[in-house]
Image (tube, grey):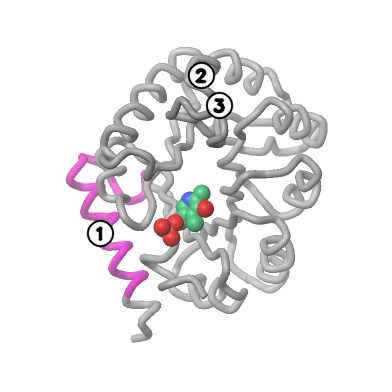
Amino acid sequence: MSELAQRYNQIVEQVSAAASASGKSASDITLVVVTKNHPPQLVFDLIALGARDFGENRDQEAAPKAKEVLASSPEKMRWHFIGQLQTNKVRSVLDYADLIHSLDRESLLVELQKRTVGRAKPLGVFIQVNLTEDPARGGVRVDDLDAFATKVLESEGLRLEGLMGVGGLAKDPEIEFDRLAKLSTKLQNIAPEANSLSMGMSADFEVAIGYGATHLRIGTAITGKRP
Ligand SMILES: *Cc1c(COP(=O)(O)O)cnc(C)c1O
């Protein structure tokens, strides 16, 4: 078995075990394999191993890769855009991405609304939350979350999936996961279907599952070190 296969299978097993430990099934959790800095061949290899969801954080790199894979993969698969998205890249990203995890500000929302009006299938979006006091960190401030979510819910071309957090700010990831989980519960008061939670990366995905993560964004633990 290749090293990639060993790592992938091991993570799938760990996800499954952590899900069971939280009274969930592995099918409740979407494993998004983050393939940034890796060539398209890695994605093809992962598809052959059973992976179906892939994440990228830069349009410039993702657009050609995603299109190449979509054009020749016989399997149904989905691209998740997970990085900060410039408004002038939205059009490009919409050509290949099924979901955007990083809806982090008003100007991006306005551009997404403009570009998704009249879509047959609404674009799935996660609101990225800024859990810090530092506005330079990406994300919607906690105090603005309800008002921002209301605007997303009023957008006909968008479907609000839930919340997204980029961890690693606090020494203890549990503090952030717990806060996000509570914000998610609160969001569901106004948007019952927006019950997804994108959090957890290579270093902390098992902990994230314990706090209710539904979408894991895992790079290096599966792909190995990024070149
Ligand atoms: C790169 C990246 C990840 C994956 O990080 P790993 O530590 O390699 O698992 C997850 N989320 C975002 C937003 C990223 O840019």
| x and y percentages locating residue 151 in the rendered image | 66, 18
Q: Which residue is drawn at 45% across and 35% down?
A: 196
Indicate whether 61 appears above or below 98: below
From the viewer's side, name the closer residue of 149 and 123.
149
Highlighted magenta segment, given as a residue range: 7-28
Residue position for label 3: 140
Q: Is mark 1 within 8 Å of ligand 1?
A: no
Residue position for label 1: 14
| x and y percentages locating residue 123 in the rendered image | 67, 38
- Please report whichever mark, 1 or 3, sits nearer to the chain's N-terminal start: 1
- Please report whichever mark, 1 or 2, sits nearer to the chain's N-terminal start: 1
Q: Residue at x 38, y 52 (%)?
A: 201
**Quarter of the picture holding the N terminus:** bottom left
Indicate whether 21 appears above or below 192: below
- Which element is circle 1 on? helix
Calculate the distance from the C-alpha at mark 1 to the C-alpha at mark 3: 31 Å
The part of the image, by quadrant, that contains residue 218 is bottom left
Which of discs 3 and 2 lies nearer the camera? The answer is: 3
Is residue 58 in view from this perspective? yes
Is residue 32 in view from this perspective? no
**From the viewer's perspective, is 108 left or right of 6?**
right
The part of the image, by quadrant, that contains residue 172 is top left
**From the viewer's perspective, is 62 left or right of 191?**
right
Q: Which mark is residue 191?
A: 2
- Which element is circle 3 on? strand
